[in-house]
Amino acid sequence: KSDMPFSILATHYPWGGRDVTGVDYLTLELYDSVDVTYWAYFSSKFRLFEADPAGDPTDPSRVNKPSDISSTRGKFTLTFGQVHPNLEYTLEVAIDEGNGDVRTLTFKMRGEQDIDEGR
């Protein structure tokens, strides 16, 4: 966890009888210390960064809050950006190494619009 302080999990989106057509959303597990883990959920439709992963991350009462646009928890700073309205977003994760060094990861999520399903 000290060399790689995060894990990336992907939830795939089934459609049209196919098991996987793409990634619906990403979940990042961010390991701050032995006992502290944060979760960031990210898609072209929602974003959430929290310490308690209980419940559904896609629940509208929990996501897309203005305070979630840029947040710092522990050694992690997450910044969500919008490239194209309702279609393409970025997530930048800055990891403070504690020695003056900061590692930065950047993710881009682009949604595809399906007229029938509105996704």
Image (cartoon, rainbow, N blue to C red):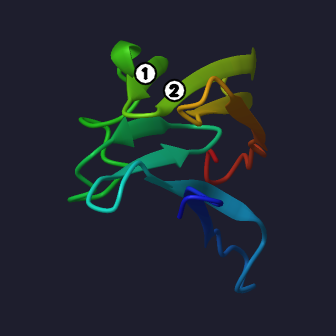
Please give left or right for residue 32 compared with residue 94 in the image.
Answer: left
x, y (%) of residue 110?
Answer: 78, 40
Residue at the spot of label 2: 77
Please give left or right for residue 84 compared with residue 98 in the image.
Answer: right
The answer to which of 1 and 19 lies nearer the viewer is 1
Q: Residues within 10 Å of mark 2 (few under 14, many from 20)?
A: some
The answer to whether marks 2 and 1 mark residues whose Cβ atoms lie closer than 8 Å is yes
x, y (%) of residue 117?
Answer: 61, 53
Dot 1 falls on a residue whose secondary structure is: strand
Q: Tell me the kind of residue under disc 2.
A: Thr
Q: Which mark is residue 9?
A: none
Which of the 4 image quarters holds residue 53?
A: bottom left
Q: Residues within 10 Å of mark 1 (few under 14, many from 20)?
A: some
Q: Which mark is residue 71?
A: 1
x, y (%) of residue 2?
Answer: 56, 58
Dot 2 falls on a residue whose secondary structure is: strand
Q: Tell me the kind of residue under disc 1.
A: Ser
- Distance from disc 2 to disc 1, alpha carbons, whole Å, reads 6 Å
